[in-house]
Image: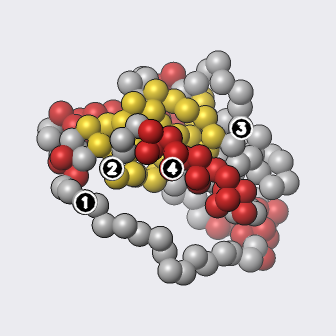
């Protein structure tokens, strides 16, 4: 895991001075049924794309609030991490992409009966949106629409 000391002076300064947003109350809905009987949707904040998809533009001043849809039956080793930042050590991701997009682990949980079913589509987006207005007003509702369309009953958010 990256520590503040390992980050560049520029990134340390940004993280120290950034005015973090607190969402209170935290939006939460208790699952209607056990996870073992539920269809799970996956949202990853890792800028992961399929090779043929356009990369995320995390270098933009306000980041990139767009999403990429990845099929849940894909081999995570073929995915590309398009996040150029220093916020985490990319070496572990090279070795095991399940660190950021845990498809193999979720498939194991489905096989073991811990999760009822995995949704057919994974939503990937950038995780360090410095101005969350577009995320809240546009991106999140689009993700919700996709999950309703897919019959998702519970969602797992994997931050990067």
Q: Position of residue 135 (x, y in %)?
A: 66, 56
Q: Is residue 108 visible?
A: yes
Res. 52 mark: none
Image quarter of residue 133: bottom right
SS for dot 1: loop
Q: CA distance from mark 4 to mark 3?
A: 20 Å
Disc 1 crowd rating (10 Å Cα; few below 14, some 14-19, many 20+) is few
SS for dot 4: helix
The residue shown at (83%, 48%) is: 60
Badge 1 or badge 2: first in the primary sequence:
1
Indicate left or right for 82 with 153 as reference.
right
Badge 2 or badge 4: first in the primary sequence:
4
Which residue has dot 1 on it?
A: 32
Residues at marks 1 and 2 touching, judged by CB atoms closer than 8 Å: yes
Badge 4 or badge 3: first in the primary sequence:
3
Residues at marks 3 and 2 touching, judged by CB atoms closer than 8 Å: no
Residues at marks 1 and 3 touching, judged by CB atoms closer than 8 Å: no
Res. 56 mark: 3
SS for dot 2: loop
Which residue has dot 2 on it?
A: 153
Identify which residue, 83 or 7, lies in the foreground: 83
SS for dot 3: loop
Badge 4 or badge 1: first in the primary sequence:
1
Which residue has dot 4 on it?
A: 144
Badge 3 or badge 2: first in the primary sequence:
3
Q: Position of residue 118 (x, y in %)?
A: 32, 37
The residue shown at (64%, 50%) is: 139
Identify which residue, 132 or 144, lies in the foreground: 144
């Amino acid at each position: 895991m990256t520590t503040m000391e390992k980050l560049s002076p520029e990134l340390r300064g940004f993280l120290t001075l950034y005015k973090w947003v607190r969402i209170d109350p935290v939006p939460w809905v208790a699952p209607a049924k056990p996870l073992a009987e539920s269809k799970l949707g996956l949202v990853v904040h890792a800028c992961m794309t399929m090779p043929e998809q356009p990369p995320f533009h995390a270098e933009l001043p306000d980041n990139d609030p767009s999403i990429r849809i990845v099929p849940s039956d894909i081999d995570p080793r073929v995915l590309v991490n398009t996040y150029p930042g220093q916020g985490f050590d990319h070496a572990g991701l090279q070795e095991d992409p399940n660190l950021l997009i845990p498809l193999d682990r979720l498939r194991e949980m489905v096989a073991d009966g811990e999760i009822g079913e995995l949704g057919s589509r994974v939503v990937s987006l950038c995780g360090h949106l410095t101005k969350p207005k577009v995320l809240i007003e546009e991106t999140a509702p689009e993700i919700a629409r996709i999950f309703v369309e897919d019959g998702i009953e519970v969602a797992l958010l994997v931050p990067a």
